[in-house]
Image (spheres, rainbow, N blue to C red):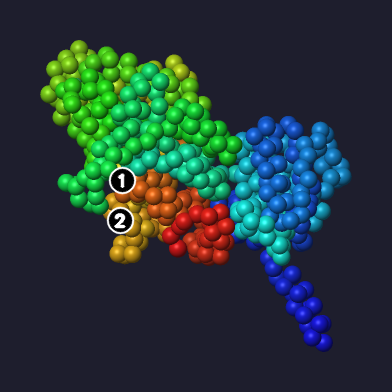
Amino acid sequence: MKRLLTLLAACLLALCARAGALDDIVPLPNKAELRKGSLRLSGAPVKCDPAFDAVAREAVAAFAAQLGYVSGRACPFSAPLGLGGAVASGKVKGLIFVKDASLAPEAYSLDVSSRRAVVRASSRSGVLYALQTLRQLLPAAIYGSKAVDRQRWVIPACLIEDSPRFAWRGMHLDSSRHFWGVDEVKRYLDVMAMYKLNRFHWHLTDDQGWRIEIKAYPLLSQIACWREGTMVGRDFNSNDGIRYGGFYTQEEIREVVDYAAARGITVVPEIDLPGHMLAALSAYPELGCTGGPYAAWTRWGVSDQVLCVGKESTFTFLETVLSEMAELFPGEYIHIGGDECPKDEWKKCPECQALIRRLGLKDDGRFTAEQYLQSYVTKRIQDFLATKGKKIIGWDEILEGELAPGATVMSWRGREGAQEASRKGFDAILSPTSHCYFDYCQSEDPSGEPLGIGGLVTLERIYSFDPLEGIAPEAAGHILGVQANLWTEYISTPEHLEYMLLPRMIALSEVQWCREGARDEARFLRVLREHEYPVLDAAGYNYRK
Ligand code: ACM
Ligand code: ZN
């Protein structure tokens, strides 16, 4: 009797042990229908259409190897010719990836019966997203590196048809205020990829440190990447006296770019200009209005000391830096900053004023001559980058003065930048402090939170974000997407960085991915607790519970 009961209990457990539930998938797919039955993936053969590119094939092979390892039952991988025909004839079993050119670039479908699972996609991105969805349907141990038995490596029979709402699903990282080594940057990219984000905005330069090697200007990685200490806590008059620095070699930059690409992520580098340039000036003081001396800042805030744009040598510098960057970063955009550029020095500088006169720039009651001077800089850099096949993005200050067609605006001081930009025919990305600043505190009770810059962006707040609010329907096509920013003035360790990133970035992923009206906060919070926290635990991330 006892044995019978045990057997019965085991059977019941096997029945109830969920094949991953469809509404546990984050970000929630566009369309997901449950069918009867399930499919065991451990030990299943995994086949990938050789028509996919090498990166996609390697990602599928890596998934098969990982699943085989953690489940203890090898999943033999192959990339045979004629897979499409064999699938159509119903001959192949297991997990199969076939190319389907009729799908949109980021779309995929997952058709699972109790015999086989067929993924269809037209591109690498679709394959990568389908792999993430499969991981979301498997036990959380798939994210780890430990072999675990006694797990059900099955997925439910279902049909998923999925594609993202927004093309730009960004996450930013400030590597200037604090420097993040290549390994931590890779961890950041890994967790972005898990939730189908696809743009990594890398803030590489600022008043407090220059972080990218530029061969033509070697002092940037000998002098500008260092600061003589850092303010302590919130005391702006303090300095810990500890020399702080770091930079990425061009080889490391290429390594990160390739690593990101293998995860479906394009790196968007930012060189913040013409303000936020104090570190660069410390190495090349002749590029400033006063000639210095300058030193990379040891405290947070916005320096008045900016590039002197009245000098041609400043443009030589910028064009040389951007030429090297254009070679290193294959994406279509380079972010040129443009935020918070105080104009006090330009007002006093004979060379900047001479350029203002030559250009005939005048205060017109809407903007000052110096604001128009910044527009001139933006346009010159935009035109130069166009010769390298690149487009510019700038923070919403680039709307001040006059913005040339073709620029993309990142709206950070609110939604107004995106509203104005899209109305005027510019593309825009929403990244307002109100919902998308992940350096802000996560709790209404900051007493239990680490030291931070202030502000408040709770998980619920980011989840509630409506990117198209206040955007005219006819301008909605100009909204490329949504991005969150993680500035690191008060963040100096990987644990703290991940704590600020997670789980808010997971909420962000549904804002970026899910079609209008599909989000449900109660479901999301349940799934976060029951499914995503175990996922983050298995993957080894620190996060706020
Ligand atoms: C910014 O936060 N200064 C773009
Ligand atoms: Zn000047």
**Is residue 357 in view?**
no
* Cβ atoms under marks 1 and 2 closer than 8 Å: no
Camera-nearest residue between 132 and 186: 186
Q: Kindly state the secondary structure of the residue where label 2 is placed.
A: loop
Q: Quadrant of residue 345?
A: top left
Tell how many labels: 2
- Name the residue: 71% across, 46% down: 65
| Vertical order, 313 against 96 (above or below) | above
Residue 36 seen from this side: yes
Q: Position of residue 496 (x, y in %)?
A: 39, 53
Amino acid type at mark 2: Leu
Q: Residue furthest left?
A: 348
Disc 2 marks which residue?
A: 451
Q: Looking at the figure, which quarter contains the C terminus?
A: bottom left
Label 2 within 8 A of ligand 1 by Cβ: no
What's the mark number on residue 489? 1
125 lies left or right of 525? right
In the rendered image, the quadrant that contains the N terminus is bottom right
Horizontally, residue 306 falls left or right of residue 162, namely: left
Q: Which residue is at 31% across, 49% downward? A: 490
272, above or below 299, in the image? above
* Residue 445 position within the rendered picture, expressed as x and y whole percent measured from the top left: 31, 65
Q: Residue at x 69, y 68 (%)?
A: 17
The picture places residue 179, in percent across and down from the top left corner, at: 38, 40
- Label 2 crowding class (10 Å Cα cut-off): few <14, some 14-19, many 20+? some
Q: Residue at x 25, y 26 (%)?
A: 281
Residue placed most toward the observer, 350 or 383: 350
Residue 280 image-quadrant placement: top left
